[in-house]
Image (spheres, helix red, strand yellow):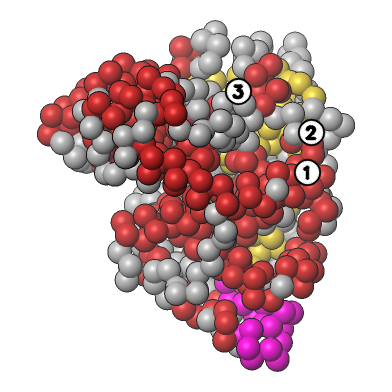
Amino acid sequence: MYVDSMVQKDVHTLSNADVIEMQHLDLDIDVDMEKKQINGFAVWKINNRNKIHELKLDTYDLTIDSVFVDNKSVTWKLDSQIKFLGSALHIPIKDSSRFVKIHYKTGPDARALQWLAPDQTHDKRSPFLYTQSESIYARSWIPCPDGPGVRFTYIARVEVPVGLMALMSAENAYEKNDSGIYTFKMDIPIPAYLMALAVGDLTFKSIDERTGVFAEPGMIDKARWEFENVGKMVNNAEQLYGPYRWGRYDVLVLPPGFPIGGMENPRLTFCTPTIIAGDRSLVSLIAHELAHSWSGNLVTNATWDDFWLNEGFTDYFERRITEQMLGSSYSDMLWELGYQDLVENVNELGPRSKDTWLKLDLKGRDPDDGLTDIPYEKGSHFLKLIEISAGRDKFDRFLKRYFDDHAFKTITTEAFLNYLDTGLIKDDTVLRKKLNIREWVYGPGIPANCPRVPQERFSKVDDERDRFLNDVPPLQLATVNWTSHEWLHFLRKMPPALSANQMKSLDIAFNFTNTGNSEIADLWFIMSVRANYTFAYPAMENFLSSVGRRKFLEPLYGEMVKNPKNAEMAKRLYERFRKNYHPLAQESLDKIVLKK
């Protein structure tokens, strides 16, 4: 048996919600787009069953104006700020206390908030605000128990400038109103990192009876076309692992500064516009965020040390949805690209690094340090190993039971391993030996029994790459009907630095410099920097000005700073475009480009 760490306190929250039940949040806020500030109040309904005399909540760069307990003003205390964690808010309460009301406003350093001027949006007509609360950033716009192991329901009243629309991770309106006041309800308990808000000039188009897309007016038609099959994704996901339990599933396409690919906010996935490629080739990201409606939103990691329980399961589920819709030869490409990412990440971190364990140890560190490919790819490959070793049908039945038995609950790594032991492995000593669980979960690097999938399509890509490297002209290569995944594999496996002439010949044939596919563009610009292929630099500059996704920015700026000559270019471009990037992206890029 594995010792369950559920009793251990989440080291990334300063709250004491482990001993005081946080039942419900009433949020009433005003969004001031000119001041770039949220102000209002949060009312927490609590159950002080343990008769604790102080409630502690997480805050980060919040100004607390006043606090009331059961309608009576109380004297509160705000601790000095702790790096990463913010400041604990101490509120005196009684045994019988039921409601705690906090009047507050956000500060200029709120890590969850990105305020965009009109020229930083797609349509360039109106300002925009969006939040990114994962991992521990909800505390920078709401005083709350900011840990994944604490779930609560909420309702909200949000006032925004007339002419703009507000959306949340809740039941939403589908058109603007004349008052600028929007109300929201989330009657399913969620953790704070799934609290989400977006405010902007938005419109909506339906996909089917329970799915649709929000976007700026100038982006809505492209987005609606790109997401044509989202409703089918939901149906296929349900066939695999049971009913979708959140009512509607809508997608919001954010302005370019969004720092990640997508965020699985319940009922309203936030996504980057970089997946709008014009050919539906990158919408597997939506399958990933949809899968979080089971793995993450439905069954949640108890702490950020258990992050693989969210992302590893979701990567696995995403690829099963994709296989069901597009066939195994297609999903096999995703598995192989993921394996390549895993190998690269392990090499970067070090094959003996404890950060390559599935069970992380992030005490004293920013939980974002754990947002590597390890929980995603090592986690999903571990589940793939279980599927192969136990048999797909048996594993699917197990996963469906897992989601049912733990619905709307949190779980630790150890609790999952015990559930796996009693629910699937049981007395099967052969299966237990095949899995080698401890090496996967509590060991570094990539275990020797890591599964690899057949590569029917990539093997053909390898042949064409070899032909190119043996001087076959690019236009004579057999590339008809290649997907973006095949092109990525084609380019990824090129020698470290092609010559400028080789780059030029590929560009003339395939127009990589001007591709509308952001995944291919980013890789091509990295290769261009290595090869000093300056023809691509103007397009690269435009790319850096219009994309805020860290997945693309970090490796591209990182490649530039390797060479002193290009480091100056990186600094010049970054200083020019830094304001377009989310605060989280700025933090990581400051270290890469400015060496802060």
Query: Which residue range is magenta in the image?
Result: 413-432
Give x and y (percent) for residue 99: 70, 50
Q: Quadrant of residue 295?
A: bottom right
Give x and y (percent) for residue 471: 31, 34
* Label 2 or label 1, whichever comes before in sequence order: 2
**Quarter of the image containing the C terminus?**
top left
**Quarter of the image containing the N terminus?**
bottom right
Nearer-the-camera pick, 290 or 174: 290
Q: Hey, what amino acid is under mark 3? A: Gly
In this rendering, which labeled residue sits more in front, label 2 or label 1? 1
Residue 284, compared with residue 411, is above or below; it is above
Say the numbered circle drawn on residue 234.
1
* Label 3 or label 2, whichever comes before in sequence order: 2
User: Which residue in the protein does label 3 denote?
Assistant: 278
Estimate the spatial distance between the alpha carbons at disc 1 and disc 3, rounded to whole Å.
21 Å
Q: Was residue 90 drawn as part of the magenta stretch in this picture?
A: no
User: Which residue in the protein does label 2 denote?
Assistant: 211
Q: Residue furthest left?
A: 564
Residue positioned 48% across, 36% down in the render = 487
Q: Hey, what amino acid is under mark 2? A: Thr
Q: Is residue 160 left or right of residue 250?
A: left
Q: Was residue 418 drawn as part of the magenta stretch in this picture?
A: yes
Circle 3 packing at 10 Å, graded few (<14), some (14-19), many (20+), is few
Give x and y (percent) for residue 426: 71, 87
* Magenta stretch, main secondary structure class: helix
Estimate the spatial distance between the alpha carbons at disc 3 and disc 2, rounded to whole Å.
20 Å
Estimate the spatial distance between the alpha carbons at disc 2 and disc 1, rounded to whole Å.
9 Å
In this rendering, which labeled residue sits more in front, label 3 or label 2? 3
Marks 2 and 1 close (CB-CB < 8 Å): yes
